[in-house]
Image: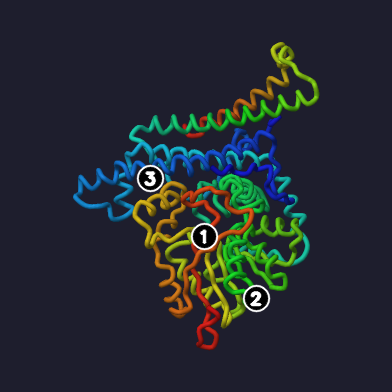
Amino acid sequence: MGSPASWQNIGRHALLPEARHDEIARLDVIAHLNAYVAERLGPKVREAWDNRASGDWRTRHGREAVDRYEVAEAMANEPAYQVYSLVRRNTMEYRQLVGRQIVGRQAETLRDRARALNASGDTLRLDPAFRPPRYVSAVEQHLMRGGYTAELLEDDVSNPANYDAGLYATIGGSGGPWSNAAGRALVDWLRREYPAFVPQRILDLGCGLGHNTLPLREAFPRAQIVAIDAAAPMLRYGHARARSLGVDDIEFVQGDAADTQLPSGSFDLVFTTMVLHETSRQALPKIFAEAHRLLRAGGLTIHLEQPTYRGLEPFEQFMRDWDGRFNNEPFWSALHESDLPAMLERVGFGRDEVFETRCVAPAWQCSERQEDFGRAPAWYAVGAWRAANGIAAIG
Amino acid sequence: MDHSLPFDANPTQPAATAAAGCRPDSPQFTDDPMVDRLYGVTLALVAELAVTRTRLDALERVLAGRGLVGEQDVDQYRADGSVQQERSRLHAEYLQRVLQSLG
């Protein structure tokens, strides 16, 4: 069994909350509890399904369970699933509380540091008149109190600081010291599959903390990079974090991924990492359409996410749906059921330009930990090339 | 020592929540809500005991490293007034973590 990395190994930057001895111990317990859920309790749920619940369902209904709803019904009273869910949910609640306690006592200090780092230049562009979409402002995503837009004090960065510190524990350090595995996975995929593709203008939609934006800066040092997010606290934190790490030329801009106000045809690469599941049924096609509008001929849009449910056996869908049911991710289930390639076609990409693939984070990487139903450093990706003059692009 | 007094544990500070926030009631995973709550408390205790054991381990290693062992010292130690106050705050914070699932 792989062992999660201690929080002591997290990458340091000026905005990272200070954690004391016992707080680090708490974060490390969270990582171990999550590993335990994935590696010990998850397989027991599978056993319960294989050895008992699937057969009981067959006996009662005279046929196999055909979808995740039927599996959920068959599994609802299975002790193995109840225990799995209880431990997983309580660990998430505990993780959020521990993060709030760590950040709460230093909220002003972190805010002041962010202010100092963000004071000069024009690369952080917040719009006080901007109203974030409701799927951002009205949801406490993954049980995070107040959600991405919450401000407990003026120029607050508390929730992003909590998110940054806690994310490392939640994924047991599997994203590397900078929790940037998705960004690194995207870069690695581009280098391997399209070594000749060197984007000049890059747009990260829903950049959050900018974790996964920075690997693009490293990979394409001459590119202009714009990172958009709807939540001011995230942008303040992400911009200050990048600066404290020596990156001062990424533009962090407050805006709506579905209506960026940026010029048409102005980007070679438009991407998201783990963002689509936190949008909405109405917004998602608009975000894809916006990506299409923003791309130059020959440009690429690509979106890293958890695997689509399409083609997965019902039990696997049921397990992957846990976050949608119990981790306050209201669009999770609908997103993963959606036919994203078809959606990309509907917003204007040609059938031959749309693709699905898998992006895996290199190095730091992956211990031997088995797939843990939502947290492994490998992603499903869906994307499309914008045709160059009517001819299918590089893809 | 970890003597922090976070927003959540301090009744004079607002809780770290925003006005908005779609957050459905906690799900119930068993037929008996008391069982769900018991799990919540037990798991928090599991985590906090692990933290305590880690701290004791650190303390023993530090003391041993400096040749300052003190079984007797600990047994004979009595907290004075200010330490008692500190401990009282620590207990309030601790209970908040351990009993979170009770609401």
Q: Chain of mark 1?
A: A
Which residue is more in the foreground, A5 or A339?
Answer: A5
Cα gap from disc 3 to disc 2, whole angstroms: 44 Å
Q: At label 1, which amino acid type do we have?
A: Trp
Q: Is residue A95 above or below residue B62?
A: below
Q: Residue at x 67, y 26 (%)?
A: B56
Q: Is residue A31 above or below residue A262?
A: above
Mark 3 is surrounded, within 10 Å at the Cα level, by few (under 14), some (14 to 19) or many (20 or more) other residues, namely: some
Q: Nearer the viewer, mark 3 or mark 1?
A: 3
Q: Are marks 3 and 2 in contact (CB under 8 Å)?
A: no
Q: Secondary structure at mark 1?
A: strand
The numbered disc on residue A11 is none
Cα gap from disc 1 to disc 2, whole angstroms: 22 Å
Quadrant of the rendered structure where residue B15 is?
top right
Q: Using the rendered image of the protein, determine whether residue A111 is visible from the camera's viewpoint.
A: no
For marks 3 and 2, the one nearer the N-term is 3
Residue A21 image position (x, y, % from top left): 69, 35
Q: Which residue is disc 1 drawn over? A: A379
Q: At label 2, which amino acid type do we have?
A: Val
Q: Residue at x 72, y 17 (%)?
A: B81
Q: Which residue is disc 2 drawn over? A: A198
Q: Which residue is disc 3 drawn over? A: A46
Q: At label 3, which amino acid type do we have?
A: Arg
Q: Secondary structure at mark 3?
A: helix
Q: Residue at x 45, y 32 (%)?
A: B39
Mark 1 is surrounded, within 10 Å at the Cα level, by few (under 14), some (14 to 19) or many (20 or more) other residues, namely: many
Mark 3 vs mark 2: tell me if same chain: yes
Cα gap from disc 3 to disc 1, whole angstroms: 22 Å
